[in-house]
Amino acid sequence: MTVNVTRRQFFKLGAAGVASSSMAMMGFAPESAEASVRQFKLTHARETRNNCTYCSVGCGILIYSHGDGSKNVRQEIFHIEGDPDHPVSRGSLCPKGSGLLDFVRSETRLEYPQVRAPGSSEWKRVSWDEALDRIARHIKKDRDANFVERDETGRTVNHWTTSGFLAASGASNEAGYITHKVVRNLGMVAFDNQARV
Amino acid sequence: MTAEHQAEHDYGTTPGGVVEPPAVVLPERRLFSHRARRLRDLSRRLRSMADFLGFAARLAQAQHQVLQKRTSTFAPDSQAFDLALEHGMPPLSVQSLQDDLDWQEDLDALCDALELNVGQPQQQLIQQLRQLDQEDRRNIAIEVLNAGTGTEGIRAFMPLVAAALQVAWLRQSSALSRPPKRAEGTAQTVCPCCGALPVASLIQVGRERSRVRYMQCSICATEWYMERARCTTCFETGKLDYVGLEGEDGRRPLPVRAETCGDCESYVKIVHLDSEVDADALADDLASLGLDIMIARERDLGRSSYNPWLIAG
């Protein structure tokens, strides 16, 4: 390369820089640039890379939010679009992915664990610890009660058919591998993935 | 899968699938005429900058005329570029072009085309430029090609000399038999054709390049792929902020935002062709000079790109 990239200097184009710029020296009024933006204000936004959560394709998305991340500014997502740099999807999204912004802002979006006890019509908010303990307890209880080591002819089967598992779609290959190992090791046979939904 | 593999059946055509955007795109010869039209449009929109943008429009129009009229006497070996392309070297080496190309004749032709169409101060400037000897003009060209700021004595000449270099360089880059490959590492911060700095970045449109970001070379106008949401200078992603201008009514005056990076404390403009399809990297960078001034008021950041028509002091 003929231009040495380590030698880079960054130019400052503030009002002072413009006053001594080529524009001023060629005979143009440097203050005209400032005048051109007098009625405008600066806006700040972020662009964040992520993956669509809907299915196992895992299309790349760009999430646009207001605010520059400073403390007093509320971050708010205002736009989501396909990531044109993503090698799998190259910026395309299906109708579900295109509707992600409504998904994020949905009033009925579930944001925390809730429990509806048997016989009750009320949903009660619980902590993540409570929710995970409760799920673990139910799983163990059901497995202890219904795990089948041998079938009626005496063959070893080691299966558990009374509970099922629906895995998440936005997971990587590695997460999928671990999920598979955990679920199959418990003997669970009813196993599916949300990616098929 | 590419469009060529689309299958036709009773229900129409299956979608073409994922199209990979080209890594490097060579410029078209009508670039200067597009740029001139855009600058004329911008000079009408931004009344306070009308003089400067109007002059820039006439300069771009003069570039177009010179490119149409003149043919270069420079005739390289037909395999000269192939060798460079084969070995991943920029085919248009600045060092050899500044000596081999007859850009000084382009500069004279540019002065002829421009002289009667500009104001008094710029006419004087053109006359002074004509009186400089070849060596002085060559030194100004070297300063432009090194992306320098120049001394006060030559700064006013730099945009005019740069305009001639752009004509001479684009004549070569637009005629290359094929674009060079994508550069690797920090070499991605400079033009893969000629090694110059970018003028700004563009969000492109079109079937193959829809919403993909490209850098445009400040001299030969070659465009090269650069991932979005990543600093184009230091390649960090953590401290990016997209700064734009907005009116009371929420209206954006120009399709331009600046991608600022807190890691290397620099920024580059992003010109959104997906907002205004006739926008131009160099033209919209000039017209959004007010954005640079407002950014400078808020934070101490430098421009990582180089616009040879607006040399900072």
Image (tube, coloured by chain):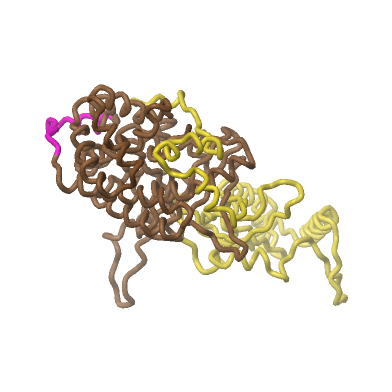
Chain colours: A yellow, B brown
Residue A193 seen in render: no
Residue B84 among magenta residues? yes
What segment carries the magenta color? B72-87
Residue B75 among magenta residues? yes
- Depth check, front residue: B57 or B28: B57
Q: Position of residue A16 (x, y in %)?
A: 55, 36
The correct choice, above or below, for B159 with respect to A131 in the image is: above
Q: Position of residue A190 (x, y in %)?
A: 64, 63
Q: Left of B37 or right of it: where is A32?
A: right
Q: Quadrant of residue A133?
A: bottom right
Q: Residue furthest front?
A: B120
Q: Position of residue B209 (x, y in %)?
A: 37, 54
Q: Residue at x 22, y 46 (%)?
A: B113
Q: Left of A144 or right of it: where is B21?
A: left
- Depth check, front residue: A163 or B230: B230
Q: Residue at x 12, y 34 (%)?
A: B73
Residue B152 seen in render: yes
Q: Position of residue B147 (x, y in %)?
A: 40, 30
